[in-house]
Image (cartoon, helix red, strand yellow):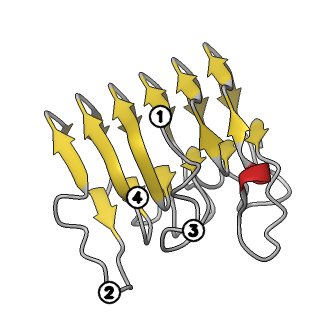
Amino acid sequence: TGLKVFSYDREPLPKQADVVDKITFENNYITRTAGIHMQAPAVIAHIPRNTSLSHNEIHETSYTGMSIGWAFAGFGYKWMANNKINYNRIDQCMLQTDDGGGIYMMDYQPNTEYVGNYISNINNLVDGFYFEEGSYWMEVRDSVVLNAPYCMFFWNAGSRSIKDAIKVRNTWAD
């Protein structure tokens, strides 16, 4: 992993003490991550709030480019909010694994935006943007996904509807 932003111990559910607040990670180049632990994202932020992950380039990863949020079905909603994951370039990820994507999101993230991201050459029949179960209250806009089996994947195994929960505007895929 190129960057780990979390203090969450997974026991038993996230709590306010697990929040990582006001982190800025910008203008970085990350390449060839997860050589030993194949399912480690290049950038992972478990319970972020007021965090900016922007203008980064991620290239050639075994697993997901960026993973934002980690709690199922609303357990993190009180704390994960106001994040900006903007203007990142993610190329050639998911080279060894599946069940992930260029950018992977999970759980409620009020006022979180994914703007101007460019995701390309995603391998193993996975997605540019992957909205895991419980993904709500976020917006994707002005982004591009090229050479990926799917531009976006919405997983919702629970009873909540994701209709109107995620806004997608002005995003292009081939």
Asked if marks 2 and 3 touch (Cβ < 8 Å), the reply is: no
Disc 2 marks a residue whose amino acid type is: Ser
Q: Residue at x 37, y 35 (%)?
A: 113
- Give the structural element (helix, strand or loop) at label 1: loop
Nearest to N terminus: mark 4 or mark 1: 1
Disc 3 marks a residue whose amino acid type is: Phe
Asked if marks 4 and 1 touch (Cβ < 8 Å), the reply is: no
Q: CA distance from mark 4 to mark 1?
A: 19 Å
Q: Which mark is residue 75?
A: 3
Viewport quadrant of the C terminus: top left
Q: Is residue 106 visible?
A: yes
Nearest to N terminus: mark 3 or mark 1: 3
Q: 172 or 15, which lies in front?
A: 15
Q: Which mark is residue 159?
A: 2
The residue to which callout 1 is attached is: 82
Nearest to N terminus: mark 2 or mark 1: 1
- Give the structural element (helix, strand or loop) at label 3: loop
Q: 32 or 78, which lies in front?
A: 78
Nearest to N terminus: mark 3 or mark 4: 3
The residue to which callout 4 is attached is: 130
